Image (cartoon, helix red, strand yellow):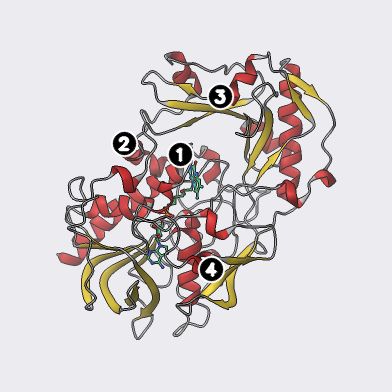
Amino acid sequence: MPSQNLLHDTSDRHVQVAILGGGLAGLILARKLSASADVMVIERGGSQPGAPDPDSAEGEASGLPYPFADTRDFRLGGSTSIWAGYCAEFDDFDFAPRDWVPLSGWPISKSDLAPFRNDAARLLNLSSVDFSPQNIVKNATKPLPIDLPGLEVTAWRFGCPQLNILEQWDLQDRGLKNVRIQTRTRVIDIQLSTDHSAVDHVLCLTDSGNTFRLHADVFVLAMGGLESTRLLLTASTQRPEGVANSSGMLGKCFCEHPHLSVDGFSIRPDHPAALLADRGLDNQDSPFAICIGVPEHEQIEREILNARAHIYRTPQMDFQEPPRLGIFLEQCPSLTSELSLSRKQDDAGIPHLALNWNINELDKHSFIQTARYVCEALEAAGAGSILSRLEPDAIMPDMILHSNHQLGTTRMSAERELGIVDADCRSHDHDNLYIISGSVFPTVGWANPSYTLALLTLRLARHLEAELKGISS
Ligand SMILES: Cc1cc2nc3c(=O)[nH]c(=O)nc-3n(C[C@H](O)[C@H](O)[C@H](O)COP(=O)(O)OP(=O)(O)OC[C@H]3O[C@@H](n4cnc5c(N)ncnc54)[C@H](O)[C@@H]3O)c2cc1C
């Protein structure tokens, strides 16, 4: 990786746009803005895996277990060095308010993100923006069975090659050459202007122990869901509740995509549906996979959250073993599922994260209903047999796995009192502060978040281009 534009000096400075965090969102944004603005990225990591100070990536989990250090990376390029590459679209109704889902409804709709689909697909190395399983399978070089009556059939696409920014992006020549990137530097504090209406500067700490102030016209927090929330909570010298937190919603509504296996169902290994444990190849030999769920009208009827089931094998399983059925669940926004600060501090004096991740009755109800619906439909199709009926009390905490998606804790809302950022990802409280991470998702659908995050980032880039033109004219 060329290093000419990676800076190591530590004098105070002023830039037009300070992007805090050089992961998926931060570097997509930097790339888009590089032609029109003076951009600087502050990135905590370098090219080595994990946090430079491993203890600082740890946290305390008081609800469901959460292995903090393994759920994100601190390299330049962020978690794209370790992600699994599953890309999926949010459904239209994931953006809409639903009577039975508290705090549901985005202030934007899926169509607001549509203009950015081609660009997002290109950046993620996807062969197409068409996620329709029927269209993918029609001309596929390795098709998969999708004729499963009664079930919503959905596709995941994977980049070819799967995006790994650190390995694949030439930081000099691919639209990032005008961007200054300071690696191995951690943003540790945010200082507001005297009237608190804007961010004045952020304080940065280099690995060699130097600090400097970074002033900017616009600050964009792009440090991932956990670290962005942590910095806002930590920066409490001027606002005891933390920066951007007049609503008190900062850290609340922590959502993951809980994954649960459905043990009471046996898949027939000789049925075509068993092939869904494998990946197909589309007409450009790019990988895709298929998952199945409860159609929208049935979700409305049952008042359940969105979810998808998948047929899978773990690497540990013998190939002769029949594949298993598992469910990725949309988690309901809940005030009691909360990210906060621990009393314990890391070596830089920054409090560790404390997480009380828990699922509520609607989450459990939705899992049971989805599992029953999918199992009955698969059994009716001859794809397997129900061995035991799932009962709500069968859900044990140790069945619930996390998916490495940290969402909801700086939520987007039209009303100031219900969130942290507005529809443009701008803080409700501080005019020149933006947040771009999965933490702005007010509800989280079932889909893996990175494709939607890329769309939101591209939309933010367009907004900032217009905003910066306004500032300079
Ligand atoms: C194992 C794993 C598998 C995954 N699989 C998938 C998948 O299949 N599909 C999918 O959609 N998503 C997946 N994800 C999630 C995906 O990686 C994230 O959605 C995506 O990377 C989020 O982008 P981001 O820019 O918000 O954060 P990141 O990409 O994590 O980048 C944040 C950056 O901010 C930097 N940073 C943090 N704190 C500071 C600080 N104080 N100062 C300066 N810089 C800081 C970090 O070093 C990092 O580079 C997976 C994640 C993991 C860990």
Alpha-carbon span between mark 3 and mark 1: 15 Å
Sequence order check: which comes first, mark 2 or mark 4?
Answer: 2
The residue positioned 45% from the left and 39% from the top of the image is 85
Sequence order check: which comes first, mark 1 or mark 2?
Answer: 1
Q: Position of residue 132 (x, y in %)?
A: 47, 25
Sequence order check: which comes first, mark 3 or mark 4?
Answer: 4
Residue identified by numbered label 2: 122
Q: Three-letter amino acid code at disc 3?
A: Asp
Task: Please tell me whether residue 185 is drawn above or below residue 360 in the rendered image.
Answer: below
Alpha-carbon span between mark 3 and mark 2: 24 Å
- The answer to whether the beta carbon of the residue marked 2 is less than 8 Å from any atom of ligand 1 is no
Sequence order check: which comes first, mark 3 or mark 1?
Answer: 1
In front: label 3 or label 2: 3
Determine whether the residue tagged by mark 3 lies in a helix, strand or loop.
Answer: loop
Circle 3/circle 4 CB separation < 8 Å: no
Sequence order check: which comes first, mark 3 or mark 2?
Answer: 2
- The answer to whether the beta carbon of the residue marked 1 is less than 8 Å from any atom of ligand 1 is yes
Task: Please tell me whether residue 137 is drawn above or below residue 387 in the rendered image.
Answer: above
Residue identified by numbered label 3: 278
Q: Three-letter amino acid code at disc 2?
A: Arg
Alpha-carbon span between mark 1 and mark 2: 14 Å
Sequence order check: which comes first, mark 4 or mark 1?
Answer: 1
Q: Is residue 174 left or right of residue 294?
A: left
Q: Three-letter amino acid code at disc 4?
A: Leu
Q: Is residue 414 left or right of residue 30?
A: right
Number of other residues with Cα within 10 Å of mark 4, as a class: few under 14, some 14 to 19, many 20 or more: many
Task: Please tell me whether residue 147 is drawn above or below residue 38 in the rendered image.
Answer: above
Residue identified by numbered label 4: 250
Residue identified by numbered label 1: 85
Q: Is residue 406 visible?
A: no
